Image (cartoon, rainbow, N blue to C red):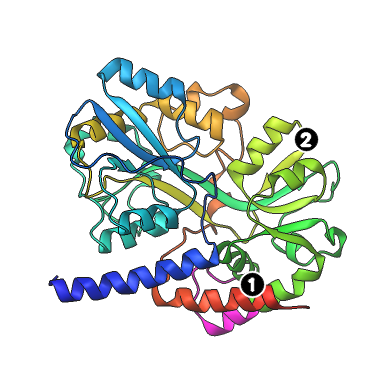
Amino acid sequence: MDKTNFMKLSRLLLTTLVATVLSGCTLFKKRQDVGNVPPAGEKSEKVLNLYIWADYTSPQILEEFTRRTGIKVRVSNYASNEELIAKLQAGATGYDLVLPTDYMVPAMIKLGMVRELDKGKIQNLRNVDSKFLGKDYDPENKWSLPYAWTITGIGVNTAAYPSPVTSWGDLLRNDKVRDRATVLDDFREAIGAALKLNGASLNSTDPKELALAKSALIAAKPQLKAFNASPSSLLTSGEVVMAHIYSGEALVAARDSGKAISFIIPKEGGTLAIDNIVIPKGATHIEAAYQFINYLYEPSTNADFVRRMMYGPVIIGTRALLPPELQRHPVLFPPAEALIHCETMKDLGSATSIYDRIWSEIKASSH
């Protein structure tokens, strides 16, 4: 691609991403960035600069990697995919590994932000469950490899709401939860849930399907307590009995609060989000990055992550290392039929502005 066309593509993608940032879209909302840009030009292979979601590693895991390899890991955190790509777009270099969510990988590839992977250096790639490979955002896994997955569905306080919950309709068309339910404050997730309710793809750009989704969310607004980006605290406090929520957040809330919170994958399906490992173009510690990828792909390392974060494992052998109650967990290890209608999000390109407009109209609606 010549420089002129590359710059045009960069401007188009950046415009799309800025629109996404302004709308607050992200799949994993966590803490703000707590690290600095790595020092420029640093070449020592005894350092790894990791830019990652908060809590995706633990001190014990990092200490064990350093003990084995002598490589010190310096960790910075970002709170959204958009924050990650904006930092790289602004010229930050020196990060050696980052973990974008599926829909962001194609944009990073098109912008020339990531290195093609040398899979010959990833011996533990054989441990990765094949069902998380070959996804349409990187069909040959030339640029990215999976690390974790989560599903967006419905969290329910079953002590306060004992009736069966099976559908997005139980959240969006249910007078029994008036002022006791929340929908994620995220335009892709909210509109996606309404699209799935009406039998459409959560990546739909069909005007009629989007109009129906918009109407469904506007009709639901009077019964909602709020649009909320992280509803677990509302569920555990009892302020709401039902919430549009990420599976990991719901499971951690249930574990840490001891409350009767269940997570349901709606029969219409939800978002299946996969976080991926990529090596940025500006990485300076390439061999250290491959050593760390191999370490992440050990079943014991993946099991530590699953126990703490309650996100789904991608490594064969992880299940056997988990406590018995997690080995049998129907969300961490869902039956295949539960995922039939789940989808990964796709980069909408120029259609992002259409979703942005619809979301603004939903938020402004007084219905």
Q: Is residue 228 above or below residue 44?
A: below
Say which label, 2 or 1, has the lower sequence index: 1
Do labels 2 and 1 touch, CB within 8 Å?
no
Q: Horizontally, is 234 left or right of 87 in the view?
A: right
Q: Which element carries disc 1, helix, strand or loop?
A: loop
Residue 341 lies, in percent from the top left, at 55, 59
* Residue in the image at 28% along x and 32% along y: 48
36 magenta-colored? no
Q: Please state which amino acid type lies under the numbered disc 2.
A: Lys
Secondary structure under tag 2 reads loop
From the viewer's perspective, is 64 left or right of 263? left
As drawn, the residue found furthest toward the top would be 67
Task: Write the residue at 32% across / 52% down.
Answer: 134
Q: Residues within 10 Å of mark 1 (few under 14, many from 20)?
A: some
Quarter holding residue 98: top left
Residue underneath mark 1: 198
Where is residue 173 drawn, in percent x and y?
A: 78, 67
Image quadrant in which the N terminus is located: bottom left
Which amino acid lies under the numbered mark 1 shown in the image of this protein? Asn
